Amino acid sequence: MVDYIVDGNIAVLEINNPPVNALSIHVREGLLTGIQKANQDGSVQAIVIIGKGSTFPSGADIREFGKPPKEPWLTAVGEAIEASEKPVISALHGTALGGGLEVALFSHYRIADERSRVGFPEVKLGLLPGAQGTIRLPRLTGLAVAMRIITSGDHINAPEALKYGILDKLISGNLLQEAKTFAKSVIGKPLDNRRLSKIAVRDAATVDKHFDEALAEVKRKYKGMIAPVNCLKSIRGSAKLPFVEAARLEAALFRELLTSAQSAALRYSFFADRSAPRWKLPSGASIENTKPDIIKSVAVIGAGTMGSAIAICFIRVGIPVLLVEQNDKLLQNALKNIGQILQGSVKLNRITADQRKQSLQILRGETSLDIVSDVDLVVEAVFENLKLKQEIFARLDKICKPSALLCSNTSTLDIDKIAVATNRPGKVAGMHFFAPAHIMKLLENVYGTHTSPSTVATIMDIGKRIGKVSVLVRTCDGFVANRMNRMVGNEAVFMLEEGALPQDVDRVLEDFGMAMGPFRVTDLSGSDVGWRIRQERAKEQGIQLTYETRFVNGERYSSLPDRLYELGRYGQKTGKGWYRYEKPFARTAYPDPEITDVINSHCRSLGIERRVIPPQEIIERCLFAAINEGFKVLEEGVAEKPENIDIIWQYGLGFPRYRGGPMFYASQVGLKTIYERVCYYYDAFPHSSYWAPSDLLRKLASHSTEVPIDQWTSKERSRL
Ligand code: 3H9
């Protein structure tokens, strides 16, 4: 894995561990023996470390973490590099990250391809650069820059790294040749002033000030995460302690992180990010064997908030959009809004003024559906009503060219029921965007019974092209996100009836790490939306909902949200919802005594006795209910694997990444505990049938030892 090549008086250690030259055990061994051999080889006067293929090492091998560590440690390899009597030059290209950058910092010189990037992304894995990265980097860059680079995990481009002193020289030509030439130029020069362990942190005297400022920043930015705090503690050590002691402190802080639940979740998330978009259908069709169609033009039907934001997703990557809206006034408003949103992006430096102009040039508003005959893909984003969608799809089927894909942005409706309105069910699918669609990363792509593999390949591919994290799910009521999240909403409201207040529930879930509690989310999206859906469903079923309604079709029902609607408390947009706001559209939510009165009088009128609901119960009732549903989703094959569910929750529902997602969280709590609590709540709340335990959960929980999450579907689902 490390080739040892001698060219004249230069030994080249070429690391060959595709795809990213991760510093796996054999690479570490190869580097160590290579350094030793070169030092013993009388003909060698300098050593070059370089990566084969597309990159210098991009870090330690993340798959080795969580397993028993194997010697030599990266630090031991690095110390041998630094101690070398012959100059060692790291020649960087691609992405020199984490342990890779640490190898470079142990080296006496660092030169780099001018297009390369460096960085310490460990914090994103819940770790710190634990092979002396936190104590070596400040010696080159000073404390403030080191703190920023290490706590952000961001990549730094080569010119910037040169400016900070991380690199000694940028190379535009052949890296290996230039590295050898550079190596020859430093033969015989003193090495001690190139050994970072011998150099002091130049601004060590100011460390407390930098530490306090950076700590306040990371606590605000990365609330609840321990890795950024440990990074800072270690960097502070680099300035306050002798080198060897600082290294010892770093090792202890690294070990604490490596064994933490947060790092396990973040490492799981790293691989889940890569595995979730890799789709596979029960038929065997998959990303590996199915080619996507190339989408060159799109029509978005419906120019409401959602439709407009979806249009933005396409035009900003250069895909022309026809935005269709019957009502010309609404259409003109939407076009104006899109212009303003893009202007906002220019102000935030997310796009240039030119890019805005180019995007708007490929957007056309139209009031007639007939205009979409030639587009490759239609995304329908009209009101959530099955009959309306069926009518539109029937018309689209007649108007659009036979090869066009017809997709719905429905968030709940069965794709099969929409597809039957057309003569091309194979080309019908769901593309469920999350509001605000131009910002939220998630795209829940939905296939129906008849959706063809090439349609699936195309919607997954286009999702990637527009920069979304695309996850494929099978059609069912609510798909994965809304189906599971409904349990959170239900339990949250039921707990209000039983004794909690909105701020109690939200606080517990936000302390858990959720981006927003369910009541703040409802206030943001507007409680009128849910009210309309409830009324519509009741009408379909011939049911009259009143304040006294406590059961619908034998299922527990709370009319509290309906009371809110009747009071005109639609949320932020009316300045009042589950919370009070200073004015309509203001963002800061204040607990509202009026809401407490509404809840208390609701309970009195229905004869419900209120009690104190402990935080643990709030967590269990919201999350365990959703997790149980998640197991049903797996059991039914709606999601192919737990990672898909977790990625949906992270990118669509604000689940904290450092907890992995509800399914990973379940694996950490333990499936026996989850199962027992689900059974307990099912006994306590028999009129909430979603508490009925999932068969898959029951089977997995019955094993004497915990079944690892990567075996949940393959092992058990086939045996159900
Ligand atoms: C560390 O270094 C700790 C040290 O400080 C201390 C030690 C004591 N290990 O992302 P891609 C796989 S912590 C194992 O699709 P790209 C990845 O799973 C580490 N595997 O490519 C995928 O596999 P598959 C600090 C890794 O071009 C394949 O490689 N470093 C690793 O879009 C291609 O990856 C990091 O955190 C790894 N380190 O992006 C860097 N990296 O095909 C993590 C990748 O089976 N890596 N794989 O799904 C990255 O950020 C990106 O992979 C990179 C390339 C930017 C390098």
Image (cartoon, rainbow, N blue to C red):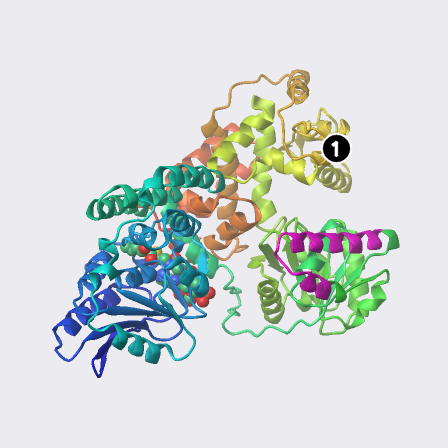
Q: Is residue 214 visible?
A: yes
Left of 508 or right of it: where is 202?
A: left
Left of 43 or right of it: where is 429?
A: right
**Magenta region, main secondary structure:** helix
Q: Which residue is mark 1?
A: 574
Assign ligand 1 to one image quadrant: bottom left
> Would you identify the image quadrant in which residue 245 lies?
top left
Q: Position of residue 176 (x, y in %)?
A: 33, 78
- Which residue occupies the foreground of this view, 255 or 464? 255
For residue 495, above or below residue 461: above
Q: Amino acid at mark 1?
A: Thr
The residue segment tinted magenta is 330-359
> Would you identify the image quadrant in which residue 117 lies?
bottom left
Q: Which residue appears at 41% of the width and 69% of the height?
A: 94
Left of 201 or right of it: where is 449?
A: right
> Would you identify the image quadrant in which residue 225 lies?
top left
For residue 289, above or below residue 156: below
Circle 1 — which element? Answer: helix
For residue 299, above or below residue 177: above
